[in-house]
Amino acid sequence: MRIVVYVVRIAVCTLVAVLALGCRPAPRAQQRAATRLGDPPVARGAVLYATYCAGCHGRDGRGDGPVAGELGLHAANLREPALLARSDAEIVDRIISGEGLRTHPRRADVATGIQVGALEAYVLALDGHPWARIRAGRFFYESQCGPCHGAYGTGEGAIGMFLPRGTANLPLASARYTDPALVGVIRRGVGAMPAMDDVVTPEEVRQIVAYVRLLSPGHRLYDTYCASCHGDDGKGADVGEPAPQAASVPPLDIARLKAMPAPRRRTAVLHMFERAQGLMPHFRGTLDGAQLTDVVAYLRTTM
């Protein structure tokens, strides 16, 4: 029921965005996809793609998403005929067990210094978060909020990119709100943001708030470069994680990092940062084969 409600909301938001942009006709690929949203797998795949894929691969699948540009990624063009000529099973297997997508920090000294500082601050606070609540909150955030606010809360969601005024930058906005105030915004809505009372329970709203509190430049960097091996909490990847190298990576020793002199700690963080590679998909612990098959069904409508 929730996914049906959310698909309806996506359709409404997209219609509003098109009207706001001057009623320009949608590209043919988008028109074809829209005509098939009545097909349940395609509708589910559209929501999942907007949440998990569009940030890097772009709303049209051309590899030009804003997250890819920000992080210097070379995301695949999903509209290549050779890609979708493969079977659904082959594509799903490639997503789940394919090689990591190499990424690199910015090479400018000032930009790299800012990134290292953000990652350092984030790592040092890993042991102070309620991870059970955060993990539950991430699940609900990515399914209910990600299509507009983006995976990291900075507005790169496929729907958010359509909106003329954009969406709130959550890492900045959340700093101005108390937890009860954030709960109120999510439950009752504000501005163009719809009320979520009919979609998530009060406890799920509190879990979303716990995850939103985590959103930051440091979280994005850690999630891209480190979490696939070290785990979201720094204690190592879950035993069910399919990345083969995860088993040989030790947990982060947060206490030892805190005890290091700051210059030495920054050198260690920079060294880790420069040798790391991000993994695609970053959300493979969240999406299963059936959901990825729905994403493929949606992609086939955009060709």
Image (cartoon, grey):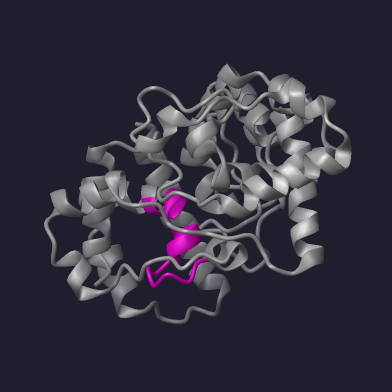
Residue 6, percent from left and from top: 42, 42
Nearest the viewer among 45 and 273 is 273
Q: Residue at x 70, y 28 (%)?
A: 183
Q: Up-down: is 30 above or below 252?
A: below
Is residue 105 visible to us here?
yes
Image quadrant where residue 33 sits: bottom left
- 66 left or right of 280 in image: right
Nearest the viewer among 280 and 12 is 280
Q: Residue at x 24, y 39 (%)?
A: 289
- 95 left or right of 253 in image: left
Residue 294, percent from left and from top: 24, 48
Q: Up-down: is 261 above or below 108?
A: above
Q: Quadrant of the C terminus?
A: bottom left
Residue 61, percent from left and from top: 37, 67
Image quadrant where residue 195 sits: top right
The part of the chain drawn in magenta is 49-65
Q: Residue at x 52, y 26 (%)?
A: 236
Q: Is residue 63 magenta?
A: yes
- Total marks drawn? 0
Q: Quadrant of the N terminus?
A: top left
Nearest the viewer among 142 and 286 is 286
Q: Residue at x 39, y 77 (%)?
A: 26
Is residue 38 visible to us here?
no
Image quadrant where residue 53 sits: bottom left
Residue 232, percent from left and from top: 56, 31
Q: Is residue 257 magenta?
A: no
